[in-house]
Image: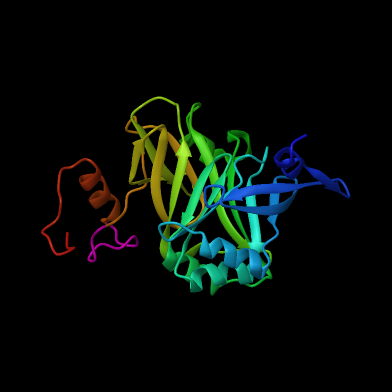
Amino acid sequence: LTDKDKQAEPRYTGGVASAAIPANDGSVSINYTESNGSVSLEMSDKKVQELIDKSVGGVAEIDVSGVKNATSAEMPKEALAALGDADLAVTIELPAGSITLNQEAVDSIAGQLKGDKVSVELLPVKKESLSDTQKQAVKANDVILDINIRSGGQKISEFKGELEIQIPYSGPQPVAVWYLNEAGELEKVNCSFANGRVIFHLNHLSLYVLGQDTGRQEKWTNPFSDVKEKDWFYSAVKFACESKLMNGVGNDLF
């Protein structure tokens, strides 16, 4: 083996695979251990500073896509905070796609961490694991993803700033993205498609569905300040707007 091959060859510690992954287009390497799809990054203060010094375009990029079956990447709390203090965005490339935390999101999330580490997860979900109502909203060729950030056993679902998600997609076109709630309701998320990837932006984490945009029923978002869900006429207003019969009188009023 060459020195490069030896460096990349996995080692095993107590049955847990360990090796190195590239960061910042290969200018930095980060050791890791992997267990049950969770990749734990070994990021000392020295390694974090190297990542900062060699970052390009204001982004620290960590590529975990070569780790088979990896669904999440975990780093020390101090590492994320230091990257935020350096005014960097952070990109984690996983086998299912990439998650980029913009600089504001890095700071916001770092300020909410309850544990010593933070985990960024992009987990492909099987339709069989959904509730009965959620299954009805999902089609056979859809890609279902559970996108999470966790720390100290808790999920961080909302934050300032935004995440950019990029997912490889080769399914039927035109493609769309929806947020899928627990009631099985779909809410469309703006997205674009380029170079074989669906790109969308989030500031709320949960289940998301990628699939062909075929006019499937979506959750209606009420735009009117003078219409409340408890009002007797709510369902009539909802029907009128969804059917494009009425648009209201302006200024958020129906």
In front of the other: 7 or 99: 7
Q: Residue furthest front?
A: 2
Q: Quadrant of the C terminus?
A: bottom left
Residue 151, quarter of picture: bottom right
Q: How is the image coloured?
A: rainbow
Residue 235 spot, x, y in % from top left? 29, 51
Residue 166, quarter of picture: top left
Quick check: 187 above or below 50? Answer: above
Residue 72 spot, x, y in % from top left? 63, 50
On the question of residue 208 being in view, the answer is yes
In front of the other: 71 or 234: 71
Is 221 positioned to the left or the right of 76 in the image? left
In front of the other: 183 or 159: 159
Quick check: 215 above or below 100? Answer: above
Q: Which residue is drawn at 65% across and 70% down?
A: 45
Q: Give the range drawn in magenta.
A: 223-232
Is 3 positioned to the left or the right of 230 in the image? right
